[in-house]
Image (cartoon, grey):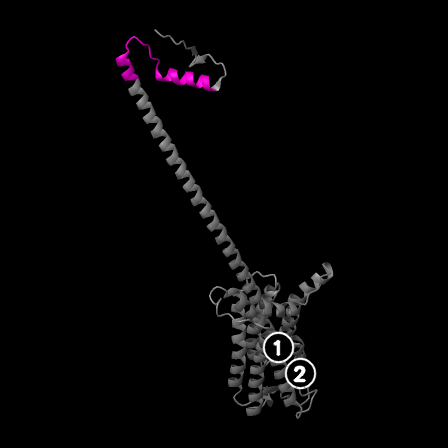
Amino acid sequence: VGCALAQAAVFPLGLDGLHISKDLFPFVCQARLWLLGLGFSLGYGSMFTKIWWVHTVFTKKEEKKERRKTLEPWKLYATVGLVVGLDFVILAIWQIVNPLKRTTEEFTKEEPKSDIDVLILPKLEHCSSEKMNTWLGIFYGFKGLLLLLGIFLAYETKGVSTEKINDHRAVGMAIYNVAVLCLITAPVTMILSSQQDAAFAFASLAIVFSSYITLVVLFVPKMRRLITRGEWQSEQQDTMKTGSSTNNNEEEKSRMMEKENRELEKIIAEKEERVSELQHQLKERQQLRSRRRSSNCAADNHFNNSASASAATGPNLYQPSLPLVRCLVAEQADKLGRNNCDGSRVHLLYK
């Protein structure tokens, strides 16, 4: 709609006193201003609102995670309505306080090519009003502020990657296109105001090119997906759904992560309890082994003492060594008929 209104403003720009009467010329002046102003607000305002929404939701997620509000569809429409409303108020006050009217600019008299004894007085019709420069400053200042802010937001969101909104880069490119053409066209047309043909050509070409380039950048990729893939999802509906469900999805993800954290903490606690239990069992086994070793050492000492006492009382009796006795006990217990111990046959001799 905005592009259509902007292109419709080209026709009043080409009208002059040869085609319309002097009484209708003020209406033509107002039609130029209103069509161009509202067309810009609707077309560029929609792109500005979308890129602002992407920037608000996806780039400030960490800094304003708790204070971020849910962006519902009506908020997007309200933002576009606010931009259009401000433009409407500015234009309405302008037309009420200092309405546009027809003025003529006279140039030096020129002699015709023929020999007729006449002089031609060139005149150029303009649309102007009292305090024209002041109103143009307010009008261009508002538009320029939107353009600069749109460029900043498009630059900030160039690295955003989301499945819900896959055309924000195209919106950024369209904003760059409109901003460059507007920032060039506005001062040039003011400089060329005394050259009607050049000013009209420059302004009309800028309007047509910016409108068509915007439409191509935004809608050709969608049409290509429709033709090649057979998939058609209204980006507007997708955007609206995203606006109302993005924060819900974030909250759902947060709840799932908290649930997973609780489960992991429970598993970790169980593992730690199992580890402590195993450490306790290991400690008990180590203590048991140490007690067994101490008891064996005591038994060995007692046996050695007994052997020493026997040797002292009965010197003629042959006493076998402790390893030999252990080997014989093991042979008798196993009952395997082994006759070797430590690689040799053992003979017990009693004297």
Is residue 322 highlighted in magenta? yes
Image height of 325 relative to 225, above or below: above
Of labels 2 and 1, the one closer to you = 1
Membership of 293 in magenta stretch:
no
Q: Is 166 displayed left or right of 325 in the figure?
A: right
- Percent position (x, y) of residue 290? 36, 32
> In which quadrant of the rendered image does the N terminus lie?
bottom right
Q: Secondary structure at mark 1?
A: helix
Rendering coords of residue 39 (x, y %): 63, 78
Q: Which mark is residue 42?
A: 1
Q: Nearer the viewer, residue 158 or 66?
A: 66
Q: Is residue 308 left or right of residue 326?
A: left
Residue that lies at the very extreme toward the front in this rendered image: 313
Residue at 29 percent across and 20 percent down: it is: 305
Q: Residue furthest left?
A: 312
Q: Quadrant of the C terminus?
A: top left
**Does dot 2 land on a helix, a strand or a loop?**
helix
User: Which residue occupies 41% across, 42% down?
Assistant: 280
Please tell me the numbered disc located at residue 12: 2
Q: Is 168 positioned to the left or the right of 269 in the image?
A: right
Q: What is the x, y in percent for residue 288?
A: 39, 34
- First to last magenta residue range: 307-333
Is 259 or 341 nearer to us in this picture? Answer: 341
Left or right of 69? Residue 29 is right
| Amino acid type, label 2 | Pro
Query: In the image, which disc is placed on residue 60?
Result: none
Q: Residues within 10 Å of mark 2 (few under 14, many from 20)?
A: some
Q: Looking at numbered disc 1 in the image, what kind of residue is underneath it?
A: Leu
Residue count near mark 1 (Cα–Cα under 10 Å), binned few <14, some 14–19, many ≥20: many
Q: Residue furthest top?
A: 351
Quarter residue 332 falls in: top left
Which x, y percent locates residue 304?
A: 30, 20
